[in-house]
Image: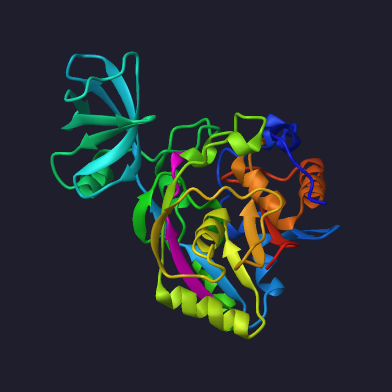
Amino acid sequence: MQATYSLSDFDFALPPELIAQTPLPQRTASRLLHVEGETLIDRQFAEIADQFTAGDLLVFNDTRVLKARFFGVKITGGKVEVLIERVLDNRTVLAQIRASKSPAIGSGIRLADAFDVAVGLRSGEFYKLTFPSDVFELIDAHGRLPLPPYIEHTADAFDEARYQTVYAKAPGAVAAPTAGLHFDHALLSLLRAKGVKFAFVTLHVGAGTFQPVRTENLAEHQMHSEWYTISQATVDAVQAAKAAGRDVVAVGTTSLRALESASQSGTLQAGSADTALFITPGYTFKTVTRLITNFHLPKSTLLMLVSAFAGYDTIRNAYSHAIAQRYRFFSYGDAMLLTTKNHA
């Protein structure tokens, strides 16, 4: 009989000093907790190539983090902070606006003392903003990198390089697909030389990825939506790996979420869509067999996802071990390698 879980089942006490505030000097210098059921093995991330064989498929999320945070002033004079959630087209975005008083529809905001945007309709916590010219050019020229809320320093040039994967290509995320931050070009070359195959998806990570679940009954949680696209080439690569009996390894929960969202018919389908897929224990994984991921926040949807993937008790045990062994947590922290116990 499948256990029923509530929000409090995904809480844990984390010593604040284990929250990684800065990246390590080298991407592959992080630690790796290799989890195989009850067996926990402490490794270095640089050793991860040893865990794969020729024909295994690594699926990476090639989204690129935008400089999505802006400070500005309303035309009426009040200070505002804007965090872009999603680019809708080359002139409009959805954004969160922090201000002492909500801006009026049709009013203007001057951002970064450089250009004005027009405030459009509000949808939930987001406003539609219209930019005066190309969104991506203005963001790149005037925006600031939006580090996660638990990182206490302002983003600097080192963050701008390291809070981005080395294979980032498609601009649109406001948070990095952090499992991919551990890979450098040398490790990718080593994996290729070993015969490990690569494929890519794009899922633009939204700020909602950091939002805790606030309802004790998980069925009442409204999952944030994110846009993804999967090419036919990636579908073909997944099918080839499965046909050969090899693993499909998601590099990060965002890659996994894209793959599983596109597999709801039972088999992976190419295309683009919004996903609000909320994966909790009891979910049957249709495509992904192994997962590389960082350590996630208490009460977060991502902690629920990895608990569904590897098993609730397995993850509780792994997190207890990681805390005892002083692993580094969250976006700039260490990684885990997991195998699913619940596959179609």
Q: Quadrant of residue 319?
A: top right
Residue 206 magenta-drawn? yes
Residue 224 at what x, y percent from top left?
48, 41
Of 297 and 332, the residue lying toward us: 297
**Total labels drawn:** 0
Of 337 and 118, the residue lying toward us: 118
- Does residue 306 appear to the left or right of 70 in the view shown? right
Residue drawn 54% across the image and 76% down it: 238
Of 156 and 195, the residue lying toward us: 195
Residue 2 magenta-drawn? no
Residue sitting at the far right: 38
Residue 48 at what x, y percent from top left?
67, 67
Residue drawn 30% across the image and 46% down it: 87
Residue sitting at the far bottom: 244
Residue 1 at what x, y percent from top left?
83, 51
Of 338 and 283, the residue lying toward us: 283
Overall secondary structure of the magenta section: strand
Write the start and end of the magenta stretch as one range. Answer: 198-207
- Does residue 147 appear to the left or right of 144 in the view shown? right
Q: Quadrant of residue 34?
A: bottom right
Residue 169 visible, this angle: yes
Residue drawn 22% across the image and 45% down it: 135
Residue 151 at what x, y percent from top left?
53, 34
**The C terminus: image quadrant:** bottom right
Residue 112 visible, this angle: no
Question: Which colour assignment does the render follow?
Answer: rainbow
